Amino acid sequence: MHGLRVAAANAAARALGVEPGLRFADARTRAPDLAAEPVDREADARALERLALWMERWSPAVALAGADSIMIDTTGGAHLFGGETAMLDDMADRLGRAGLDCRLGLAPTPGAAWALAHAAPDRTRLDEAGLEAGLAGLPMAGLRLSEDGLTLLRRFGLTRIGQLYDIDRKALARRFHSLSAADAVLVRLDQALGQRPEPLDPLRPPPDHAARLPCPEPLLHPDGIRAGLERLAPALCERLDAHGEGARRFRLAVFRVDQSVAEVTVGAARPVHDPAHILTLFRDRLEAIDPGFGVELMELEAARTGPVTPQARSLDAVFAGDGPDAAELAVLADRITARLGGRVVNVLQPVESHLPERAEALSVYEGELPDWRSVPPPGPAPRPLRLFERPESLEVIAEIPDGPPMRFVWRRIVHRVRRADGPERIAPEWWRPAATRRARDYYRVEDEDGRRYWIFREGLYGDGRGGPPAWFVHGLFP
Amino acid sequence: MIMKPGIQTGAARADCPFPYGLGQAGVHELAEGGFGDFPVLTGFALASLRDAGRAGACVWIRQAALAREHGHLSGRGLAAFGVDPGRVILVEAKARMEALRAAEEACRSTGLAGVIAELDDMDFTASRRLGLACEASRTPLVLMFPHTRSGATAAQGRWRVSARPSAPDQYDARAPGRPAWRAVLEKSRLRPGMAGQIFDVEFADETPCLRLVSGLAARPSAPQPRRIGSGMADLPWRNAG
């Protein structure tokens, strides 16, 4: 109906009168040799998110705001970059070097900062005292309102934010067609003025502790990253020690000169506060980091912190030789995890279930060995040492319908049963649908070669739940 | 993982008795006698580690393909076997290289009862590396291989273990009795003279340990163990057959 429109234009195009919102046909008339590309909102959003992650170099609390804005909470952090003005200049400089146009605004509230960035001259700063006065002169569009809301306000003759200050709120609400539309205007105004809290929703939760290392010269070699980590780890551990804590997850982020970030995350089985151990965790993972055109800032973050347990073991335990040394095991688990990556070091946890496949579960080893001593034996007959994830189907010839098989075919090989023990009946769980619920009769059988199998018959003849019973092998005995 | 330390073979502990350092120190290999003997290897490895009587946890490294083929280790099964499943740490390796790396790391660690690794194969260099890792820490490493395993190795020894028909159960003649295995010492660095020797062993549930048994007691019609190697005179127990 409307045809193509201009979504965004660069400075050269704007100089020729091509503005966003203009019909593409009109834009062509104004600039016949206009270079245009179809807009890809998803790619834009991804690029903005990548940029936002890189902006974490100024503060860990970075949030996306709309399709074209990034909010950064720099509270208490500006002095690291030489003050607020210097920080804004630094941002503009680095973004400019990347070929990005930007408009920056700095204010005590996210709403006001948004207004400054969108409606005020570049790099405007406002402090708490000057907030109301500073915003008063800005156009209404700075308030993050919907198109309809703006139109309505314009009809009332309200074009500047300051005009809203003295208006009776109830009177304003009456003019809007709905209460929520009026509310939206007032909420945005309150948020901008700091009368209503507006928490940021950061891309990533801020870390518990972090250490940063700016590089005077961009690092180009992986060895440089390693050396940087060797300086970051003690710095981070000092901070952890000050709180008496250790961390179980560490994230190393390197900020490259081309506005991209590479990161590696490692985990530990128990809270760690030892620099040497942190380096071990990262040892084989640093190769994954590509320095690209150079690394200008490194950051090491600690998450999942917890109190560090005292290292000493009781003397009794040492002499009795009873129980493994948990600290040593945790270190070993971390070394293996660091070399193999992922959730590879596990322990078997008992689960209360009669069904053998549900009676235990693998869980990641987190410094605690499970306690099996209080677990009662599952049944009268022993369980096999090796269990199949899914029982494997068998072809069986049985002497009597409800007895153990005489021979069975498993994996295309015929096994003649020499000895058999059973059955041990394991009833199905009563809360499952009755139609598919069949009892299992388990037998322990030995074939001619002496190999032992744990096989079961699912169902009975004439139990009225499906066809004839099926046989499966579920486990193998030594 | 040790419940009752000490070997109960009914004989005085000689300088290096059966099973010749298996589960006590160094790298030892177990290989399937034929396809399907992996559960037997599992039992043999656990029993030997337990007989060695070292305290601490056991690290069990498994290669994904072998776990799919032969089933995964069951906690209740371990408990039934007399091993505390709470002292077994499982490491999941996707491929052989990962399993070897994990085994090397685990071997360097002290204070473990032992390390058991399921591998599909390994070359001489890898076995040498593992041997060096074990030497410093004196942590025993038991490697479990499929029946296709052959070739040179730097390990202390290689056993080929297979299942053997069991003797009838004490109380129920139709039920399978105690697990019975046949272990052939294929290679041994500690006792080169014993290479080729066949051992018929039985696993006793009541006093969990490996026990050498007479072939006659197991089944009269069983083939008599052959005498391939020499040097049986120094054996402290009654020879099978």
Image: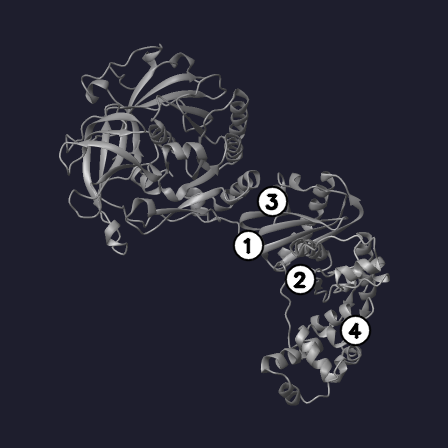
User: Does residue B180 appear left or right of residue A205 in this picture?
Assistant: left
Q: Is B121 drawn above or below residue A199 in the view shown? A: above
Q: Residues within 10 Å of mark 4 (few under 14, many from 20)?
A: many
Q: Which residue is mark 1?
A: A308
**Mark pair 1, 3: CA separation:** 14 Å
Of the two numbered discs 3 and 4 in the rendering, the one whose residue sits closer to the viewer: 4
Q: Is residue A10 visible?
A: no
Q: Residues within 10 Å of mark 1 (few under 14, many from 20)?
A: some
Badge nearest the viewer, 3 or 2: 2
- What is the chain identity of the residue bearing mark 3? A
Image location of residue A278, percent across then percent down: 62, 46
| Spot occupied by residue A290 in the image (x, y as percentages of width and height) | 70, 41
Name the N-terminal-most of marks 4 and 2: 2
Residue A250, disc: none
How packed is label 3: few (under 14 Cα within 10 Å), some, or many (20 or more)? some
Query: What's the CA distance linking mark 4 and mark 2?
Result: 21 Å
**Pointers 2 and 1 within a single chain:** yes
* Disc sitting over residue A126 in the figure: 4
In the rendered image, is residue A279 in sight? yes
Tag 2, which chain? Answer: A
* Residue contact at pointers 3 and 2, CB within 8 angstroms: no
Whichever of labels 2 and 1 marks the residue nearer the N terminus, that label is: 2
